[in-house]
Image (cartoon, helix red, strand yellow):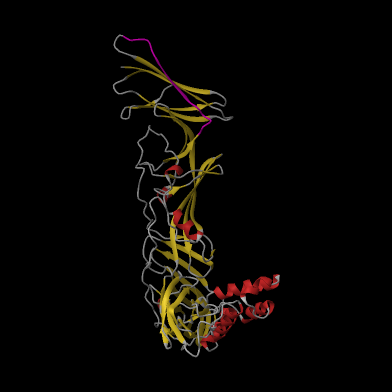
Amino acid sequence: MVLMGLGLFLAGTLAVAIEVPDTTVTLYKDKTLVVRTATVKVAGTEQVQWPLLTGQVDPASIQVEAEGAEVQRVEVRPTYVPAFTAEEVHSALQRLGPPRPPSESLSYSRSQSDAFTELSIMAERGSPPAVDVMATLKGEGLAKVVLRYVLSGARGRYRVELTVRSQPPQVEATFLGHILQRTGVDWKDVILHFDLSRKMPPFEATGPLPERINRPDMLEEETALRRLIFNNIGQPTTANWNARASRQRDIPVVLIGTVVDVNTGAPLKDAVVTVATNRLQSRVYAFTNAHGEYRITDLPPDPAGYRLVFEHPRARTRVHEAVPAPNGGSLRFDERLWTGAGPDPDPPEPPVEGGCYLGGSVDPVIIDYLVAGLGPRESELIAPPQDFARPAGPPHGVWKSPDRRFTAPGRHIVLDNTAPRIPLLTETWPVTLHRQVFLEKDAATYLVGEVHPSAEVALLMHHWIQPVVDGKQQKFLKLWPRPPDNTFTLPLGTDPKVRAVRRVQRGPVEWNAREVQDVTVRVPNPYAEPMRVRVVDTLPRGARLIRITPGAHRDDETATLTWDLLVPPASTGAVSFRYSR
């Protein structure tokens, strides 16, 4: 309601206020499109007032169209939302009491300390940018009004989750959209679309182009309150000369300049400028206005120069040492800060060999989003199933974003500075769980799932996946399909409880063979329920199979023998074969 009142005040006229528009957010490969729809009643010529658009809105992208009415004019007014109210500031100042020197801050009571902390937080809090949009409509009756604009600061990726259950044996596959939401505004009760395989298509305006109307800064009260806060928390905005400076000898210096985004050139409001010199009793502080401008007067000149610090809540801090400060006159110093809106003009030093540079304090939300897109370390991989009975597919493939749009079921709340994973599609597929041994190649017993998926399995292929098996998180794996039926083997690690034994001994000599070998594989079942086991073995090159017990599937191309056993509880399954050569 505060934002709505501010919007009506900026417009300077009474308009039809759209209270709660229906909002849709579509994430494309390159941009994020927001569409807000509302139904209003029009009687003749009416002005429609949207709630203030906050966050990283591109004012040039704003378009308004209507069904059931004619859009005659669209006005766009860039502005800011006050970072705090007068009531908040005066309440904290009253509890803090009269200003004290920094040396006496330790004598604050608990209430005064809390008030000091509140004021310090307010001093660092920037005024969020906003855009006020008003449309003039002409018509009679109900009209559907649509507002479109581009929002920066959001990125999307696709993710996959697999949950395997042994009772009943099934795999639940979930395809998700992973959002890095850093747009400066919360998305509340929105419909989410993901179309990450293509760039946002251009949309043509059916009505008049928006008129950008620049108004003087409407935040004079906030500026006065911010100056009051600084002066009461030991960050003076006026210069106090010390004994090294002489007003009879020295002529004061006026420091002016602008602070802008290094990539976009946009002015940065609420950037804090700090001046330090050995001719001041304490540092002097200033902050930029809506045009990115700052001004500090009555500074003493210093042959050694000034130390200037430029800070902003959404930008990297810059420090300049020994800035020349001549006697008298005006000194201009403009600064360009990196906000992350484009390439970093001053990247950090490359990491030392074997090290990793994270650039100081890194937002854990960004780390979660970036790390989720990287492949796991070798130690985090599930050992592949030793399924030598069937030809394996390529272990490495390039996953391509599906050329389709996904709509997340229901409505969602996506808060700013979060990285939620939104389920887009969930399916349950049957799976046959069994153990697998191939003792000639590997002593381990592998736990394997043979999954029979739907056609949507293509969404999962070539993703790094960390499955959950019966409630326990496993290591990473990557899937690939097995043509032509798209079934795939799901490696689930090894089963240390099942310890199979392979024994080879000489058989009775035959007249037409140099040697005869008997091979026996025994697989004990330590569990209280029947256990499926696939036993795989090979015939040596040039060998002749004499007998096999029980019957097995023989693949002459790979020279493998495969048995599928069902071992009763607390029993041992056994297979054997004899060959000569």
Looking at the picture, how far across and down is residue 566, in whole percent? 50, 28
Residue 64 at x, y percent in the picture:
44, 78
Task: Locate the C terminus and report the quarter of the image it occupies.
Answer: top left
Q: Which residues are magenta?
A: 495-510
- Up/down of 13 relative to 398, above or below: below
Residue sitting nearer the eye, 203 or 129: 129
Q: Residue 324, located in which quarter of the rendered image?
A: bottom left
**Quadrant including the N terminus:** bottom right
Q: Is residue 566 magenta?
A: no
Residue 257 x %, y %: 43, 82
Determine whether, in the image, residue 479 is placed left or right of residue 5: left
Q: Is residue 186 above or below residue 557?
A: below
Q: Residue at x 35, y 14 (%)?
A: 516
Hey, which residue is sitting farthest bottom in the picture? Answer: 248
Q: Is residue 187 above or below residue 50?
A: above
Residue 304 image position (x, y, % from top left): 43, 77
The residue drawn where x is 64% and y is 80% is 99
